[in-house]
């Protein structure tokens, strides 16, 4: 069965410091992995996706994630946090046999302090 | 192009009443999905349309939920009768094959 675990429900960083949001997945198939972000009162926006090409994936707004098959991880990072990064982030997996049905992690709420 | 549009953005209804949520996908997108997030839980898949046909409705919680997509364009999700545990945010998304999802802003449903 496919599942996603986001290891931290809340992360708090200072502006200008690095961001690390952790995600582990479980998949019996070759997974596609995504990170989505939701700002308050907004829809879910795709940050980046991994679909079996390069293991280091660059996304929008300076975010990137590295697919590590041996660790079944897909952690999201950003070198320097900005106040506008404060939002909730979701790690998501889908697999080709599931008509692209998405399986969401529980979400990590990122707070950025001045 | 216009994004995925959901109506209403918020709905507050009493237990036992009926509510209908609407989703207008991106024009030309054959795939339409409904997801929901109840308080404190993960976002969960409800169902998937391909054009007007239900491809997968394995996530529908019970027979109080009815989804339709007449003509393969917009979709409605009706909850009848609504229960307290139905409160949450209902998301709609659409996609064309292999081009990824676009999500709407969601409908926040509160059942009191």
Image (tube, rainbow, N blue to C red):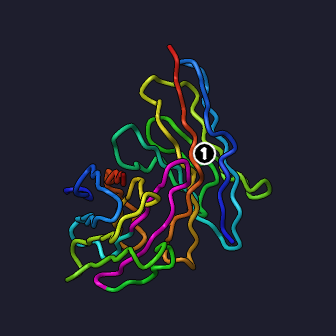
Q: Quadrant of the N terminus of chain A?
A: bottom right
Task: Pinpoint the chain carrying mark 1.
Answer: A
Find the magenta span and give its range.
B34-52
Counting from the top left corner in percent of width and height, residue B75 is at 26, 72
- The image quarter in which residue B33 lies: bottom left
Number of numbered discs overlaid on the protein picture:
1
Which one is in front, A59 or B110?
Answer: B110
Q: Is residue A26 left or right of residue B31?
A: right
Identify the residue under disc 1: A65
The percent coordinates of residue B37 (x first, y second) are 47, 55
In this rendering, would A30 be left or right of B68? right
Q: Main secondary structure of the magenta part?
A: strand
Instruction: List the single residue furthest toward the top.
Output: A114
Q: Is residue B43 above or below residue A47?
A: below
Q: Residue at x 60, y 30 (%)?
A: A19
**Could you say which is closer to the camera, residue B107 or residue A76?**
B107
- Does the rendering let one see residue A28? yes
Q: Indicate whether B13 appears above or below B28.
A: above
Residue B12, above or below B33: above
> Between A53 and A104, which is closer to the camera in this rendering?
A104
Relative vertical location of residue A4 with respect to residue A22 in this rendering, above or below: below
Does the magenta-highlighted stretch encompass residue B45?
yes
């Amino acid at each position: 069965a496919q599942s996603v675990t986001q290891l931290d429900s809340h992360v708090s960083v200072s502006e200008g410091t690095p961001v690390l949001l952790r995600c582990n997945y479980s998949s019996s198939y070759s997974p596609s992995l995504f990170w989505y972000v939701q700002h308050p009162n907004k829809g879910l926006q795709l940050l980046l996706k991994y679909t079996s090409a390069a293991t280091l994936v660059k996304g929008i707004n300076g975010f990137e994630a590295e697919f590590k098959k041996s660790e079944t991880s897909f952690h999201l990072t950003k070198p320097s946090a900005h106040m506008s990064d404060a939002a909730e982030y979701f790690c998501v997996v889908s697999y080709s046999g599931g008509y692209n049905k998405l399986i969401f992690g529980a979400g990590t709420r990122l707070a950025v302090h001045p | 192009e216009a994004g995925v549009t959901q109506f209403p953005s918020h709905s507050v209804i009493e237990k036992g009443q009926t509510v209908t949520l609407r989703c207008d996908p991106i024009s030309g997108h054959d795939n339409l999905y409904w997801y929901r997030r109840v308080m404190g839980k993960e976002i969960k898949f409800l169902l998937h349309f391909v054009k007007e046909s239900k491809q997968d409705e394995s996530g529908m919680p019970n027979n109080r939920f009815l989804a339709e997509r007449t003509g393969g364009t917009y979709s409605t999700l009706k909850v009848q009768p609504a229960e307290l545990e139905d409160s949450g945010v209902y998301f709609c998304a659409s996609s064309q094959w292999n081009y990824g999802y676009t999500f709407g802003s969601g409908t926040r449903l509160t059942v009191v």
